[in-house]
Structures are given as C-alpha cells and as structure tokens.
Amino acid sequence: MTDALPELTLILPELILVCGGMALLMVGAFTGDRSYHSVSWVSVLVILGAGVAASATTEPRTTLFGDQFVVDAFGHFMKWLVFIGSALAIVMSFGYNRRERIGRPEYPILIVFATLGMSMMISANDLISLYVGLELQSLALYVIAAFRRDSARSSEAGLKYFVLGALSSGMLLYGCSMVYGFAGSTGFETLAGLFSRADAAPEIGVVVGLVFVIAGLAFKISAVPFHMWTPDVYQGAPTPVTAFFAIAPKVAAMALFVRVLVGPFFDLFQQWQQIVVFIAILSMILGALAAIWQTNIKRLLAYSSIGHVGFALVGLAAGSTDGVRGVAIYMAVYLVMTAGTFCCVLAMRQNGRMVENLTDLAGLSRNAPLMALALAIFMFSMAGIPPLAGFFSKLYVFLAAVDAGLYTLAVIGVLTSVISAFYYLRIVKIMYFDEPAEAFDKPMGRSLAAIVAVSSVLVVAFIAFQTPIVRAAEVAAAVLFFS
C-alpha cells in the first residue's frame, strides 16, 4: 500500500475527476433535473480542482503503473488548457440549456467524464492506455452531441459522430495491433528504444501500422481527409456542445497526436513527417476555401477549426522542440479565441430563438456595439492580423517550419492564412457596414459577457504577457524528446 501512495498522489487530478464525477452522478440520479444548476457549478469546481492538483506536481517527468501513464510538464500544460476549456463549456451552457429546457445534470457530468478521458489521453504512455482514454472521451462526446433529444438535427449529429468515430477507433486499433505485431511492444518508451537502435529501415508492417494510428488520431482533430464529420456535427449539435467540441477535445487530441509522434515514433520521423505535411496542407487549404461559401456561422467555424488544425500541424511537421512549442502556444491561443467567439454565437438570439446565419449579424455594431467589437477582435485574431494573439500563434509555427527547412509548407500556410482572412473580414464587414437586421435579444448574460471580456483582453494584450506562456510551452516541449 505504501508503494502505491506516491503513484496515487501523482494521478490526483484524475482521481478528483473520477470521484467527483461518480459522486455527482449519484446526486443527479437521486435529485433529478432540479439539481442541474448546482451540479453544473460543482462540476466546474471539480474540473478546476483537478487543474490545481496537476499544478501541485513538481516532478519533471515520471512514469506510473508499469510505464502506462506519464506525468510531465507537457501533460501539465495541455491538461490545464483542457480543464479551462471544459469548465468554460459548462459555464457557457447555463443560459442556453435553461432556455431550451434541456438543463439536466447528465450534461455537466458527461463533460466531467469526457475531461477525465482527455486527461488520460494526454498522459498516455502506452498504446493501450491511449485507447482507453480516447474511448472514455469519445463515449461521452457521442452522447452530448445528441443531447437535445427532441431535435432531429442533434440526433443526426450524434449518430454521424458515433458511426464515423467507431470507424476511426477501428483504424486506430488496427494500427496499434500492427505496431505491436511487428515491434513486440505497446509501451512508448520501449518502442522509442527499439526504433532508435534500428540500424536498417523499419519494417514495412510498423510503417503501415503507424499510418493507421495517424489516420485514427487525425479523425479526432478533424484533419483533412478525416474531417467529414465536423461541419455536420458542429451545425447539428446544441451550440454549447459545439463550443465544447471546438475547444477541449481538440486540444486533448492534438496533445495526444504530438505525444505519439514525437515520443515513441520520433526515430521514424522521415516516415511520418511527409504524412503530417500532407494533411497539414490539405487542412489549411480546405479550411481556407470551403468556409468562403458558408452562410451558417457554426459550419463556418467548423471549417475554420479545420484550418487551425492545419496551422498547428505545421509546427508538428517541423519535428523540433520549437515546433512542439509552437503547437502548444497555438492551441492555447486557439482556445481563448474560440471560447470568446462561441460566446458571441450563443448570444445570437432573436425573439427568444437561436439564429445562426451570417446575415443575422448585419448592423450589429449599431445594435450591440460591444459585442460587435469583441467579435471583430476574435475574427481579426483568427485571421492572423498583428498585433493580436492569432498572429503570434501562427508566427511561432511558421518560424519552426522555416528553421526545419519546410519553406514550401510555410509559404502555403501564409497564403492560406491570407485567403481565410476573406471570410473572417466578411463577418466584420457584415457587422459594421451592412444595413441593420433585427436586433438580438438583450442582455447577453453575465457569464457569457465575462468570458467575452476576458477573452478579448487576452487576445489584444497577448503581446504584453506572452513571455510566461512561451516559457511554459518551451518547458513542456523539451520533456517530450526522449534522451
């Protein structure tokens, strides 16, 4: 028992999430829908408590449970992003769920268990623990995608996500079995040691298995050509669920993607770099072009998220510490921009009903000038216009690509960023120059307004306080490269 205590201390964030989730599940089961509000706030406290517990760990890098689980600086950095994103998603859902009469305690509880799965994903140090964490997250996401049971679109979104998610899980498992069959291990550190000692090229079976693993993980970050679920699920799911999908699971899946490729398979860099470059280019191009013709803001943001995944993958393709640092910074900035943007989308209500068309934003600068200003800031930042946070996030990944000699990839990234600026600036043009449409219902809501205000300040003032974030990202990136 004494030997197990240090390990239990290091997984305290996960223990808080699982114990808190189980306790809240019992409360929700016995009290019913009337406990929704209290369960939601306690869920936020549980998630933030897990974040505090993660910060209390000072170990630089420690493996637990027979090297199945790893605790390190990279995990701490990415977990905090996930915890913040999950907590924000619960807070953002209060008003919407109450007005739409879908406020049930299962909603925040499912987010808590999804967050537990994401935390396990980020700390996975074995292909088996990777899959367990991934499926724990996915099962919760399948349910909340279809959480609005009286909506055909929500049910369709959940079904599409489930079917395609099952397909991606099958591809991932097949890849893991191929790697195990040809390498003889599923442990990340054992695999890293095997590939580093290989004098000749890796066996073709390992490479094929790696391709299937990448395909399965690419689905989770909605990278092209595994993006097909994203627009339909984003549009069909309830808007707070869409916001959650766009924030926390995206960050966790990107962290897992980075850990898998930079950790056990880093010595196969020549094999996986070309795949990552390929899907990065496709994601940036599709994200830039497909969104131009969108009239629904949630579908537009879905294609925008695909483009942002492509930009983040540029840093991973560099295969360097600077590249991974760029990915970490990019995901931190992406979380802030996306949270603020979806708060504005949640405030798009006319006569008590949600509206989602871009034309509904017409003349917003005259009807709600502060909301229009905040949304304009987020759009300029997503477009990468200096000196906002989005510019620096792209700068770090592009500089890493240039340092790695990936000049073509960096040029394509800059060009697609310019193209994508069209539809971001079109939203600003609609808000400030088009004839006013019907005004949105007021007020926005205190929680949404607070998130929008803080996100706006962080995006605008990023240049002033980026140093601690950059340093934390550097420390996080450095521990990933096995010695």
Image (cartoon, rainbow, N blue to C red):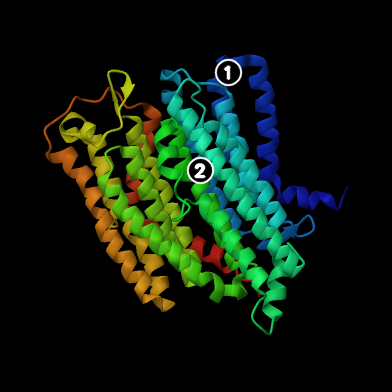
Camera-side residue of 20 and 350? 350
For label 2, count other residues whose C-alpha is less than 10 Å away and answer few (under 14), some (14-19) or many (20+): some
Residue 58 figure quarter: bottom right
| Residue type beneath disc 2 | Ile
Real-space CA distance between mark 1 and mark 2, rounded to the nearest whole angstrom = 23 Å
Residue 78, position in %: x, y? 54, 53
Residue identified by numbered label 1: 35
In the rendering, at what x and y percent does residue 467 appear? Answer: 42, 62
Q: Nearer the viewer, residue 211 or 105?
A: 211
Vertically, is 294 above or below 74? above
According to the picture, the residue beneath numbered tag 2 turns out to be 84
Residue at the farthest right position:
1
Mark 2 or mark 1, which is nearer the start of the sequence? 1
Amino acid type, label 1: Ser
Q: Secondary structure at mark 1?
A: helix
Q: Residue at x 24, y 44 (%)?
A: 376
Which residue is depicted at the point 43% across and 48% down? 335
Looking at the image, residue 132 sits to the left or right of residue 282; the answer is right
> Which quarter of the picture shows residue 401?
bottom left
Tell me if 61 is positioned left or right of 284 in this view: right
User: In the image, what residue occupies the spot 58% across and 38% down?
Assistant: 47
Q: Is residue 322 visible?
A: no
**Vertical position of residue 434 compared to residue 404: above or below:** above
Q: Is residue 210 visible?
A: yes
User: Is 83 placed left or right of 292 in the picture?
Assistant: right
Q: Is residue 69 left or right of residue 459?
A: right
Quarter of the image that includes the C terminus: bottom right
SS assignment at label 2: helix
Q: Residues within 10 Å of mark 1 (few under 14, many from 20)?
A: some
Q: Is residue 352 above or below residue 276?
A: above
